[in-house]
């Protein structure tokens, strides 16, 4: 569904990605793990058009979407939940969710998905009229994910959904990520520092190091790989 | 009925301004002048609020767009006014009104085009950088106008004089009402949520499918258009304009109104424009200390009430209940 070939990205004169290639098959969950500065977030940002890549190709559903403007990529059904949550702090929860459906015209479908979001994260319904900026980190992350679902994506890219969130909430958020994948059939590309958890819910994984793909394998095999255990899973 | 509420309010506002205008001869000239100043400042503040408040950009060049509108419309009435009135059937309220309407629109359009030319390249910049570019544009307009030939259409450093005093109560408040209506309708629509998205978080907006650059340009061009109208009204009220009248301090005046009223709150900004304009009259005897008082007022506001007089949130949570 999503194919990246030899993606190269530079920030000024510093190269952040030295030709990253990866494949996300339809209906799967694929994980991208790696240390800080490995280029995980950069990869997602380049795919979703938030930054321009220098060379390489991004193909979505067989269509070349390399360096299209971000809003056009969202319109194609590829939605990115950026790192650090990034909710619209001054808008209410409901307004945030409706903002997610910004590109949609089907009122009935939007209402249905709003209901689905509240089923998925009942906490959001309790806080429907609260300004998003006043919620806890975990709640904001739920909102960011639900908001992305509101855009009715076929493929979702999540950047560090566990970052800075209470462990209790991390578990429930990951359960919902699996549910989104299973029940709605949304393909997911997940970037995580918490490699253990990410590899547990995904089929396939890539290990990124300083802008290169170091390893790729099934998540099962990666979890057993001594190199990965040493570096990312705490021995 | 509810959906027509704002249209109804607009029509009432237009009717009232026409009514007051018809009996404006019975109002004391001094007070009438203050009221017209209030109206023009409301127009400026509301239009800047779309850029600085709702869309969260920081423009410091509103006076430049006002200048473009003032010069544009004045040149039309000075150079072609007599001919146009003749074509429209000779002197009378209809011909003069139509001439003024055309002149104002041309002034506004010139300002909007300038807004577009400045906005498209510079709105890729954020925060302070945009402030510097718009500040620079403000100075460029002023300096260019100042250095034009004294005999040319722009009048050089002395500016233009002998502009017809077309501006009256109706024109000022009708324009202000239309601006308030247009900008509120724009911001409160589904489409308008894009402005708020740009203000709150550009990256999140982009990743939700909002074309942030386009929204910023629309806000900037719309804001410039209304600033241009304000300039045209100002020129035809004062009957003389000079480049000095549109300096950096004029832009700061408008920014102060927006900040004091509460960024993004239309009601707050209108209130601030009224209060500051009237305050200005009271401070006329202390002319040279005016800016000191303004600065102190701003500092006190920032400490005591940083969200402004009437912050936007008060009105935004309307759907709650």
Image (cartoon, coloured by chain):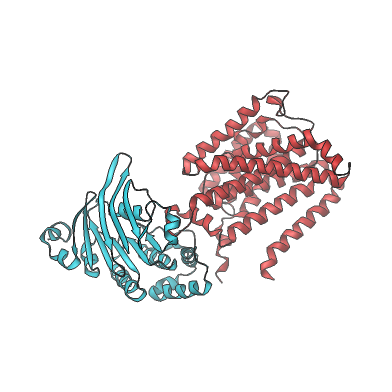
Chain colours: A cyan, B red
- Looking at the picture, tell me which residue is in the foreground, A69 or B255: A69
Residue at (40% x, 72% y) in the render: A123
**Quarter occupied by the N terminus of chain B:** bottom right
Query: Residue A121: x, y in percent?
Result: 39, 72
Q: How many marks?
A: 0
- Looking at the picture, tell me which residue is in the foreground, B230 or A16: A16
- Looking at the picture, tell me which residue is in the foreground, B145 or A172: B145
Q: Quadrant of residue B240?
A: top right
Query: Residue A134: x, y in percent?
Result: 43, 61
- Residue A207 in sight in this render: yes
Q: Is residue A195 left or right of residue A73?
A: left
Q: Is residue B83 above or below residue A177?
A: above
- Residue B305 in sight in this render: no
Query: Residue B222: x, y in percent?
Result: 61, 48
Residue at (37% x, 53% y) in the render: A66
**Quarter occupied by the C terminus of chain B:** bottom right
Query: Residue A11: x, y in percent?
Result: 32, 43
Q: Is residue A234 left or right of residue B42?
A: left
Q: Quadrant of residue A227?
A: bottom left
Q: Is residue A36 left or right of residue B270?
A: left
Residue lying farthest left?
Answer: A226
């Amino acid at each position: 569904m999503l194919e990246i070939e030899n993606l190269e990205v530079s920030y000024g004169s510093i190269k952040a990605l030295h030709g990253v290639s990866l494949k996300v098959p339809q209906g799967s969950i694929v994980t991208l793990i790696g240390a800080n500065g490995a280029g995980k977030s950069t990869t997602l940002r380049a795919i979703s058009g938030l930054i321009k890549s220098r060379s390489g190709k991004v193909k979505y559903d067989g269509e070349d979407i390399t360096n299209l403007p971000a809003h056009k990529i969202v319109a194609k059904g590829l939605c990115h939940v950026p790192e650090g949550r990034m909710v619209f702090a001054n808008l209410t929860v409901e307004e945030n969710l409706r903002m997610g459906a910004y590109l949609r015209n089907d009122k009935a479908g939007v209402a249905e998905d709003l209901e689905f979001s509240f089923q998925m994260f009942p906490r959001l319904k309790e806080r429907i009229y609260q300004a998003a900026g006043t919620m806890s980190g975990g709640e904001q992350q739920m909102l960011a994910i639900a908001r992305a679902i509101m855009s009715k994506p076929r493929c979702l890219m999540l950047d560090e959904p566990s970052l800075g969130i209470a462990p209790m909430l991390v578990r429930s958020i990951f359960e919902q990520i699996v549910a989104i994948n299973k029940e709605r059939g949304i393909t997911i590309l997940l970037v995580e520092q918490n490699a253990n958890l990410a590899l547990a819910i995904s089929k396939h994984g890539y290990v990124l190091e300083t802008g290169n793909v170091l390893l790729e394998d099934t998540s099962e095999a990666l979890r057993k790989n001594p190199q990965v255990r040493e570096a990312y899973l705490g021995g | 009925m509810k959906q027509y509420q704002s249209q109804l309010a607009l029509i009432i506002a237009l009717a009232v301004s026409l009514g007051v205008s018809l009996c404006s001869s019975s109002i004391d000239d001094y007070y009438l002048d203050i009221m017209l100043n209030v109206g023009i400042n409301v127009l400026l503040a509301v239009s800047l609020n779309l850029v600085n408040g709702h869309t969260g950009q920081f423009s410091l060049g509103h006076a430049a767009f006002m200048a473009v509108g003032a010069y544009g419309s004045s040149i039309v009435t000075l150079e072609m006014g007599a001919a146009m009135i003749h074509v429209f059937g000779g002197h009378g309220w209809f011909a003069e009104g139509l001439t003024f309407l055309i002149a104002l629109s041309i002034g506004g359009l010139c300002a909007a085009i300038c807004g577009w030319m400045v906005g498209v390249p510079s709105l890729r910049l954020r925060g302070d950088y945009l402030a510097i570019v718009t500040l620079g544009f403000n100075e460029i307009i002023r300096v260019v106008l100042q250095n034009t030939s004294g005999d040319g259409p722009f009048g050089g450093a002395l500016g233009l004089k002998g502009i017809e005093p077309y501006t009256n109560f109706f024109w000022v408040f009708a324009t202000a009402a239309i601006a308030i209506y247009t900008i509120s309708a724009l911001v409160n629509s589904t489409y308008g949520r894009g402005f708020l998205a740009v203000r709150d978080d550009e990256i999140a907006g982009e990743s939700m499918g909002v074309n942030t650059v386009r929204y910023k340009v629309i806000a900037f061009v719309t804001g410039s258009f209304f600033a241009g109208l304000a300039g045209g009204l100002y020129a035809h009220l004062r009957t003389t304009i000079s480049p000095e009248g549109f300096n950096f301090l004029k832009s700061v005046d408008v920014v102060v109104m927006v900040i004091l009223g509460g960024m993004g709150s239309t009601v707050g900004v209108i209130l601030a424009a009224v209060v500051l304009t009237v305050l200005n009259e009271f401070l006329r005897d202390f002319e040279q200390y005016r800016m000191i008082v303004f600065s102190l007022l701003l500092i006190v506001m920032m400490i005591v009430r940083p969200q402004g007089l009437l912050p936007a949130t008060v009105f935004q949570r309307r759907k709650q209940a």
